[in-house]
Image (cartoon, helix red, strand yellow):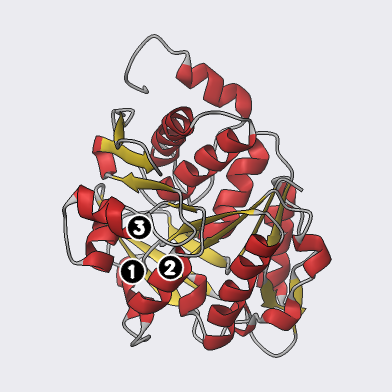
């Protein structure tokens, strides 16, 4: 198994037309979850990936499993929970450049995920374990699980990747949320925050301070995503570098771009590419993702990625 990731995936209801939800009556059903997005992105590039989670033993939960399995991800470790529902969220598209999201995930099956649900023999097969900052904010048991997984990765020589992936609505309900994320970040080999996320975590917008604060503990590589500008990265003992983003004509849906970026970085590292090459691939996939509707629909297969990277034009049209 090349990559194993775990966390909550919800059913997404995306409005067909634009406007406030009170005036919208048609929706497209899909799935959305940061960790499963990454899993699908890496799988589409030809790697073996497993996603670990809990969903409700209901029709929505079975739909989530079916959809993710259909994208080439192993779902054999997903638990069907009889006592809690599958989470869901609704998107609201008020204009082309502005979306709102409404979550209905409190008490979901995934929030009940704990150490006892993990098959450690399965986890030991992984070359990379990837987690995000969403999971530790779902519940105390999920937070304990994140620590256990990162400790397991270190003990077994498995590369650990962490994307803070801040969700302010979750943080508002967890008084020690920032401390939780910083504690987990220090246990990962690679940390990939957005610049705004790093600014929130460290109360500074200075890149040098961000790198200094993140390159501690076990962490030897840091990538700081800087929106449409590109991404800064630094490896232990080296100077910081910058990779510009790939410009696009029009952003259709920004949701999932960071997950696509992470998938590109992790797949590239599996293939022995340098961090600079990995970040470059991440920016390319991020560009492809924002041009498509949905959380994971724009994640490219290998041929699509290669066609984009070899395109003569510097703008995706």
Q: What is the C-alpha distance between the residues marked 1 and 3?
A: 40 Å
- Residue position for label 3: 214
Position above or below: 208 against 56: above
Question: The residue tagged with tag 3: helix, strand or loop?
Answer: helix
Residue at (39% x, 48% y) in the render: 222
Q: Earlier in the sequence, mark 1 or mark 3?
A: 1
Question: The residue tagged with tag 2: helix, strand or loop?
Answer: strand
Camera-nearest label, 2 or 1: 2
- Name the foreground residue: 238 vs 268: 238
Position above or below: 95 against 314: below
- Residue position for label 1: 21
Question: The residue tagged with tag 1: helix, strand or loop?
Answer: helix
Badge 2: how crowded within 10 Å, few (<14), some, or many (20+)?
A: some
Q: Are marks 2 and 1 in contact (CB under 8 Å)?
A: yes
Position above or below: 65 against 298: below
Residue 156, given in percent of the width and then of the height, sits at: 72, 59
- Name the foreground residue: 217 vs 176: 217
Residue 298, given in percent of the width and then of the height, sits at: 50, 39
Q: Earlier in the sequence, mark 3 or mark 2?
A: 2
Q: Earlier in the sequence, mark 2 or mark 1?
A: 1
Name which quarter of the figure residue 46 lies in. Answer: top right
Looking at the rendered image, the quarter that the C terminus falls into is: top left
- Residue position for label 2: 90
Residue at (66% x, 82% y) in the render: 114
Camera-nearest label, 3 or 2: 3
Position above or below: 93 against 7: above
Q: What is the C-alpha distance between the residues marked 2 and 1?
A: 9 Å
């Amino acid at each position: 198994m090349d990559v194993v990731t775990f966390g909550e995936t919800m059913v997404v209801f995306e409005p067909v037309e634009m406007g406030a939800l009170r005036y919208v009556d048609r929706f497209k059903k899909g799935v959305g979850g940061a960790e499963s997005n990454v899993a699908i992105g890496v799988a589409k590039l030809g790697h073996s990936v497993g996603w670990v989670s809990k969903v409700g033993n209901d029709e929505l939960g079975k739909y989530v499993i079916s959809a993710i399995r259909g994208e080439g991800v192993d779902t054999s470790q997903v638990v069907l929970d009889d006592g809690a529902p599958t989470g869901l969220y609704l998107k609201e598209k008020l204009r082309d450049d502005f979306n709102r999201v409404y979550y209905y995930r409190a008490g979901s099956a995934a929030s009940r995920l704990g150490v006892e649900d993990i098959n450690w023999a399965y986890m030991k097969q992984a070359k990379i374990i990837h987690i995000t900052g969403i999971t530790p904010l779902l519940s105390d048991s999920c937070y304990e699980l994140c620590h256990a997984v990162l400790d397991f990765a270190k003990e077994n020589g498995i590369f650990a990747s962490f994307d803070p992936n801040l969700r302010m609505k979750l943080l508002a309900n967890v008084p020690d949320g920032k401390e939780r994320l910083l504690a987990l970040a220090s246990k990962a080999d690679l940390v990939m925050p957005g610049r705004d996320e790093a600014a929130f975590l460290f109360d500074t917008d200075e890149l040098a301070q961000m790198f200094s604060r993140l390159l501690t503990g076990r962490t030897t590589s840091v990538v700081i995503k800087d929106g449409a500008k590109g991404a800064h990265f630094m490896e232990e003992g080296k100077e910081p570098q910058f990779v510009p983003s790939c410009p696009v004509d029009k952003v259709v849906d920004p949701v999932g771009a960071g997950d696509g970026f992470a998938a590109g970085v992790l797949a590239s590292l599996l293939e022995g590419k340098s961090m600079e090459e990995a970040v470059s691939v991440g920016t390319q996939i991020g560009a492809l993702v924002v041009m498509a509707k949905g959380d994971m629909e724009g994640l490219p297969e290998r041929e699509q990625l290669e066609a984009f990277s070899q395109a003569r034009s510097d703008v995706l049209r």
